[in-house]
Image: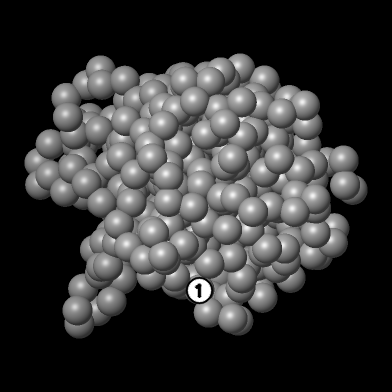
């Protein structure tokens, strides 16, 4: 997995929050700053609600404006057909207004990454090999105005993890990350347990394949047909003795696997007398209330699951409520509690596969403990998809 940590090397008004709810930089009336280095392209993509590409159609030096025709949705579906920018207001630490007007070229391709939160858009754009920032606020009476330029980026334009010298080549890279060639991972999450999601969404690539992530709390799973992997997050199916799927949702999951998809399942909640139901599986399995533990024993069928890309040993995982009562159609890859309960089991169904686990990802320390196993599960799933084609 290729991820890079944001290093705080400037004052706190970084563009780190440009694409997150806490984006302090663009909310400051006077002080502006730069994105800190080590902010990688996958991180920028992840934190953007939308990524679009298009062409600069108008550059008006006298009015200090530019128009961009939006031509392709790379992530999300934008409401803009034309993005209008302005360069007449100075808000940055350095005045780049004259430079941006000279720099922009009519007819050149441009890529815009933005995060839209209500009536606020914060964005970074890339054209002719350079990054720059813009922002816009929606007015009640006039709607969206022109996106206001703030400054060229300092660190994004220098650091190897973010610098891209050719915008057309960068567009090809993004299409590989977000297009049909990428592995599409669809993640069902719950707002009650928020620590698992960031780790899974940060799994950006496996070997040479990009992982495109999409998360939802909707158990109807809209958009599932476009996915390669469906991850059913921690306690999204069952919690506090309540099972949360209906027949239609169960059947949709089974149809997804039958048609070639992979379902990975984090630990679910089973209580005494109220085990997690398993109508989402084509074969019977029993949810079991279990004690928290970290010991497990791989079976002879585990293959590379506990070796690639990380070696994982007994005692290194956070485990909880498990599964029992499997039949011969399940291939058990690891057990606990003296072989009575599943840690990981594989079930082939139609053209696809289930990977069922009892990983406990309730809190940050548990997710941190299981982080490498989450990566191994995705790696295992990608290898299956590769071999099944």
Q: Where is residue 165 in the image (x, y as percent from the top left)?
A: 59, 28
Q: Position of residue 383 (x, y in %)?
A: 78, 37
Q: Position of residue 225 (x, y in %)?
A: 69, 68
The residue that disc 1 covers is 245
Q: Where is residue 34 in the image (x, y as percent from the top left)?
A: 29, 30
- Foreground of the two, 276 or 153: 276
Q: If the image is split into quadrants, where does the N terminus sit?
A: top right
Asked if 157 appears above or below 323 in the picture, the reply is above
Question: What residue do we see at 66% from left, 27% from top?
Answer: 298
Question: What residue do we see at 72% from left, 63% from top?
Answer: 283
- Foreground of the two, 102 or 231: 231
Q: Can residue 68 be seen in this view?
A: no
- The color scheme shown is one colour
Q: With 326 as the anchor, is 213 left or right in this view?
A: left
Question: What residue do we see at 25% from left, 17% from top?
Answer: 9
Q: With 304 as the anchor, is 30 left or right in this view?
A: left
Task: Give the SS element for disc 1.
Answer: loop
Quarter of the figure with residue 380: top right
Asked if 173 appears above or below 254 in the picture, the reply is above
Q: Can residue 37 be seen in this view?
A: yes
Quarter of the figure with residue 294: top left
Q: Residue furthest left?
A: 30
């Amino acid at each position: 997995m290729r991820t890079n940590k944001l290093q705080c090397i400037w004052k706190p008004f970084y563009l780190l929050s440009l694409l997150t709810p806490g984006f302090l930089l663009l909310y400051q009336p006077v002080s502006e700053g730069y994105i800190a280095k080590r902010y990688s392209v996958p991180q920028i993509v992840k934190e953007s609600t939308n990524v679009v590409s298009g062409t600069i159609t108008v550059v008006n030096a006298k009015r200090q404006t530019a128009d961009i025709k939006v031509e392709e949705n790379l992530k999300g579906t934008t409401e803009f057909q034309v993005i209008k920018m302005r360069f007449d207001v100075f808000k940055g630490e350095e005045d780049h207004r004259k430079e941006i007007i000279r720099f922009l070229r009519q007819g050149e391709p441009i890529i815009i990454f933005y995060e839209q939160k209500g009536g606020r858009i914060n964005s970074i754009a890339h054209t002719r090999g350079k990054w720059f920032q813009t922002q816009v606020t929606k007015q009640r009476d006039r709607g969206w105005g022109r996106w206001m330029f703030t400054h060229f980026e300092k660190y994004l334009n220098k650091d190897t993890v973010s610098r891209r010298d050719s915008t057309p080549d960068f567009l090809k890279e993004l299409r590989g990350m977000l297009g049909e060639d990428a592995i599409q991972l669809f993640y069902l999450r719950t707002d009650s347990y928020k620590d698992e999601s960031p780790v899974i969404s940060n799994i950006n690539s496996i070997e040479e394949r990009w992982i495109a992530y999409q998360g939802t709390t909707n158990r109807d799973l809209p958009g599932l047909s476009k996915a390669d992997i469906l991850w059913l997050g921690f306690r999204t199916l069952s919690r506090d003795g309540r099972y949360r799927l209906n027949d239609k949702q169960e059947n949709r999951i089974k149809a997804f696997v039958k048609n070639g998809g992979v379902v990975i399942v984090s630990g679910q909640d089973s209580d005494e007398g109220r085990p997690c139901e398993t109508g989402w599986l084509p074969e019977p399995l029993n949810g079991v209330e279990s004690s928290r533990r970290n010991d497990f024993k791989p079976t002879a069928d585990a293959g590379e699951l506990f070796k690639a890309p990380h070696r994982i040993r007994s005692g290194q995982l956070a485990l909880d409520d498990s599964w029992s009562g499997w039949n011969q159609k399940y291939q058990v890859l690891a057990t606990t509690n003296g072989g009575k309960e599943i840690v990981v089991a594989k079930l082939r169904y139609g053209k696809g596969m289930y990977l069922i686990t009892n990983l406990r990802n309730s809190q940050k320390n548990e997710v941190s403990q299981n982080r490498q196993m989450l990566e191994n599960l995705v790696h295992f799933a990608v290898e299956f998809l590769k071999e099944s084609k």
